[in-house]
Amino acid sequence: MLKNYDELSPVAIDCLREIGNIGSGSAANALSTMLGKNVIMRVPDVSVMDYQEVIDRMGGPEKVITGILVRLEGDIGGMIMFLLEDSFAKVVLSTFMQLENVSVMTLDATQLSVISEMGNIMAGSYLSALSQLTGLTIDMSVPSMTVDMLGAIMSVPIIEFAEVGDKVLFIDDGFVIDGVDIKSNIILIPEMASLATLMTKLGVM
């Protein structure tokens, strides 16, 4: 039985990297359909990192980002969080609302709901791809979105998953939409029993 993410073998990390690849590709396709634009996905890099490493890598605790959090239920319990920078909001809102040069710090409720719905679609596509790959039933909660400093956003999984330890699966990916580089990161925090189930399904345990 896995006790923490540090016990994952290189083969298991490779499997998680492929899951990240497939899930991100599915999310990119959904985004392309919704935006009516060509979306090119960058190859994801999957690492096991502690929370402070994630925060440092993304620009520090005071960096303002959009966090979209989805809780996982069914055969897999845990949490997945999309961390999106201003460029994502700018592309989405210029497409759907003809707004230019927006900042996530000044969005109204309607504009925030548009961003949230994009996150909902991306998360659903990501988890659907994972479910099809593994044959597991993965349900998701209604996504909750917040715009805040990275340190504050990361405090949620730090508190809720303290028993798992201070490590998370960090997926560094992103998209290129109409020549605009969209920086995106995903934090996947399955409960340890769920991670063991996932690895067993993939044949690496």
Image: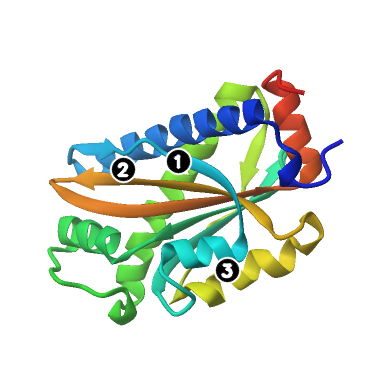
- Specify the amino acid type for callout 3: Met
Query: Which residue is under mark 3?
Result: 154
Name which quarter of the figure residue 101 lies in: bottom left
Question: Around disc 1, counting alpha carbons within 10 Å, would you say few (fewer than 14), some (14 to 19), or many (20 or more)?
Answer: some
Q: Is residue 9 above or below residue 72?
A: above
Q: CA distance from mark 2 to mark 1?
A: 20 Å
What residue is rendered at 48% in x and 72% in y?
150
Residue 151 appears in view: yes
Query: Which of pointers 3 and 1 lies earlier in the amino acid sequence?
Result: 1
Residue 144 appears in view: no
Q: Is residue 116 left or right of residue 187?
A: left
Residue closest to the eye, 201 or 59: 59
Label 2 SS = helix
Give coordinates of residue 45: x percent, y percent: 45, 41
Query: Which of pointers 3 and 2 lies earlier in the amino acid sequence?
Result: 2
Q: Is residue 3 above or below residue 143?
A: above
Give me the disc on residue 31. 2
Query: Which residue is under mark 1?
Result: 45
- Specify the amino acid type for callout 2: Leu
